[in-house]
């Protein structure tokens, strides 16, 4: 048997072996819906629109990210979000604001709803940070834009770390979830405080 035939047989055998193992399954994770903080029972005469959240490209995709040092970010190959982080943040925020009962209506910008105020946000960080200790980092900025005046009338920045209780990816997800919900509750409380002082109540 010449060398070419031997090489071909070895290649075929290697391909056969590589096809025998089952591929590693991809696991999908999500965050829980935010719980509305205890706010005023009075509904404000405000129709609020929430714009799409902007972010770096990495947070507009589904893989879960981790940070190695100050300048390097990687992603897990087999662990992903059920939807991109920017969509989770927007969806959770809309549900939180609606469930608070503080507004006449809350909808995503671009829907058929009209509103004087548009809440715009940017997600800067949403990742595991390798330690020790291992933590998660969530950083985001929100601005309230008044369509009537053409000005930003309120802003809130959030950037905090949350320790990871374990080494499994599920522990990382839990820590990110806790961190995100804390940040969104801050946003909702601050927004309500501003609008309560600067808008009329629904009669």
Image: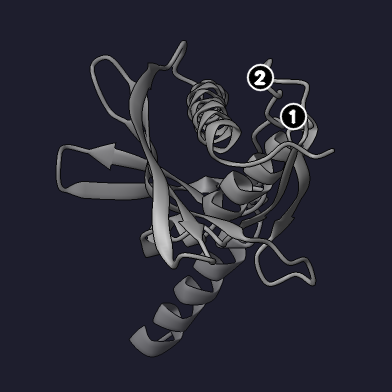
Is the C-beta separation of discs 2 and 1 under 8 Å?
yes
Helix, strand or loop at disc 1? helix
Q: Residues within 10 Å of mark 2 (few under 14, many from 20)?
A: some
Q: Along the polypeptide, which appears first: circle 2 or circle 1? A: 2
Which residue reaches farthest right? Answer: 203
Q: Which mark is residue 143?
A: none
Q: Is residue 162 above or below residue 92?
A: above
Q: Which of the pair 42/168 is nearer the observer?
A: 42
The residue positioned 38% from the left and 88% from the top of the image is: 4
Q: Residue 39 at x, y = what percent?
A: 67, 19
Helix, strand or loop at disc 2? loop
Q: Residue 145 at x, y = what percent?
A: 48, 58
Q: Is residue 9 above or below residue 142?
A: below
**Tally of marks:** 2
Q: Residue 19 at x, y = what percent?
A: 63, 62
Q: Is residue 132 above or below residue 42?
A: above
Q: Residue 136 at x, y = what percent?
A: 38, 27
Which residue is label 2 attached to?
A: 37
Q: Which of the pair 119/122 is nearer the observer?
A: 119
Find the distance from the CA under tag 2 to the CA under tag 1. Answer: 7 Å
Asked if one can make out residue 24 in the rendered structure from this viewpoint, the answer is: no
Which residue is label 1 attached to?
A: 100
Left/right of residue 22 with respect to residue 66 in the rendered view: right
Asked if one can make out residue 68 in the rendered structure from this viewpoint, the answer is: yes
The residue positioned 50% from the left and 59% from the top of the image is: 146
The residue positioned 51% from the left and 51% from the top of the image is: 63
Q: Quadrant of the N terminus?
A: bottom left
Q: How is the image coloured?
A: one colour
Left/right of residue 133 with respect to residue 138 in the rendered view: left
Q: Quadrant of residue 195?
A: top right
């Amino acid at each position: 048997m010449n060398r070419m035939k031997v090489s071909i047989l070895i290649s075929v055998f290697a391909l056969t072996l590589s096809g025998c193992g089952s591929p590693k399954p991809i696991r999908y994770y999500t965050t829980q819906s935010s719980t509305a903080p205890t706010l005023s029972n009075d509904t404000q005469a405000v129709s609020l629109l929430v714009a799409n959240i902007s972010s770096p490209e990495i947070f507009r995709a589904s893989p879960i990210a981790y940070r190695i040092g100050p300048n390097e970010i990687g992603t897990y190959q087999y662990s992903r979000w059920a939807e991109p982080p920017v969509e989770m943040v927007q969806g959770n925020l809309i549900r939180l604001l609606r469930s608070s009962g503080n507004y006449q209506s809350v909808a995503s910008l671009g829907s058929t709803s009209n509103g004087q105020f548009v809440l715009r946000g940017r997600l800067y960080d949403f990742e595991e940070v390798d330690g020790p200790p291992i933590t998660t980092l969530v950083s985001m900025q929100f601005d309230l834009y008044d369509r009537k005046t053409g000005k930003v009338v309120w802003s809130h920045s959030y950037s905090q770390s949350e320790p990871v209780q374990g080494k499994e990816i599920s522990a990382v997800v839990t820590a990110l979830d806790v961190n995100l919900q804390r940040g969104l509750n801050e946003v909702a409380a601050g927004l309500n405080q501003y609008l309560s002082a600067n808008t009329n109540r629904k009669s």
